[in-house]
Image (spheres, rainbow, N blue to C red):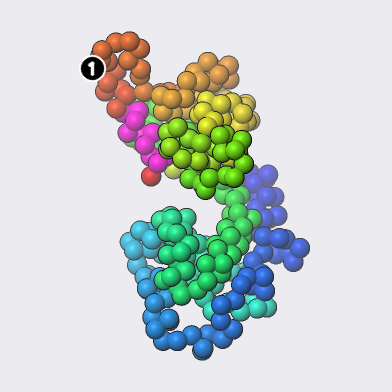
Amino acid sequence: MSPLLKRKVAKMTAVSPDLPTILDEDHCPVDNDDADDVPDEMRESRNCLSSYSLEENDGKCRQMTGLSWTMFLSLFTFLNQFVKRRGYISLPPRDQLFITLIKLCQNPSFFFLSHVLKMPQTTVRQIFIRWLDLMYGKISILVHWPDRECFLMIPPEMKAQFPRLTAIIDCFEIRTEYPSNLKARAKSYSNYKKWTTVKYLIACSPSGSITFLSNGWGGRASDVHIVRQSGFLSSVYHSPGDQILADRGFTLQDDFALLGVELVTPSFTKGRKQLPGREVEMSRRKSNIRIHIGK
């Protein structure tokens, strides 16, 4: 781990009462003051959406939250030390994190979560928002550009085809409610999703870890525009000879060439009826590796 990253980790993990990212249950709406007052039928309903219902079950936990049980428990153990418990919420802290991850992974509506948990929507929303803030404040440091030595550990199936690969990039969109402001609505409308969205550039290393995440843009912004404005085109991240893998929509070969970087994308037909067999096979290989960023 580099000295800079070590300093960042030390700063992010320091327990300080002044940090706004520390979850304070006094400021979360409380639906019940005493766990003993929760009716049996309500408790049974909550149990079906509880982390305790899939304890030690990696498969089910991964399906529900995107994390294995061991990883989920490690994440909770780390975050739980920053939770103040001066007040009381009838939903245990571990289940609060559990439903937050379910919301991120599966995106059920707040109405659905409220109905299943037998809690007011305002309570569920506040729990989600505060745990989201806590995770951003404490684990966003995990998204960082790795040291050069890390790029030497490329999986063999990738190294055989792209020996200098350092990143796979893509843009993803998150659907939003329609903004009331017409100008904001126009900027956030995505022709691809046919809805208003927020759009981000994301990069992952060949080993699969997320190494770059841009600021959010309205869904109207093109992939090319976001890359150029995100700061990703910088010698801070890239060295001459590096290879970046992307979809064919990232027509930025010249931009990356200025840094001495090769942008690898699937081939275009460019007016041809079909691609030659060799180009088809090479494009298929590129796509098979690039698709890892969507998993």
Name the residue located 51 percent from the left edge and 36 percent from the top edge: 189
Q: Nearer the viewer, residue 15 or 228?
A: 228
User: In the picture, residue 93 is in which quadrant?
Assistant: bottom right
Name the outermost residue toward the bottom: 36
Q: Which residues are magenta?
A: 285-294
Q: Which residue is mark 1?
A: 277
Residue 195: tell me if it is visible: yes
The secondary structure type at the circle numbered 1 is helix
Q: Residue at x 57, y 44 (%)?
A: 179
Residue 70: x, y in percent?
A: 43, 64
Rendered residue at 61%/62% (across/down): 130
Residue placed most toward the observer, 31 or 247: 31
| Residue 61 coordinates in the image, percent (x, y) | 38, 63
Extreme-right residue of the structure = 18
Which quarter of the figure has residue 185?
top right
For residue 77, say whether it is visible: no
Magenta run includes residue 268: no
Q: Main secondary structure of the magenta part?
A: helix
**Between 250 and 7, the one nearer to me in the picture:** 250
- Residue beneath the point at 39% across and 77% down: 45
> Is 52 situated left or right of 189 in this image?
left
- List x then y, in percent, for residue 104: 47, 55
Q: Amino acid at mark 1?
A: Gly
| In the image: residue 184, left or right of residue 190 | right
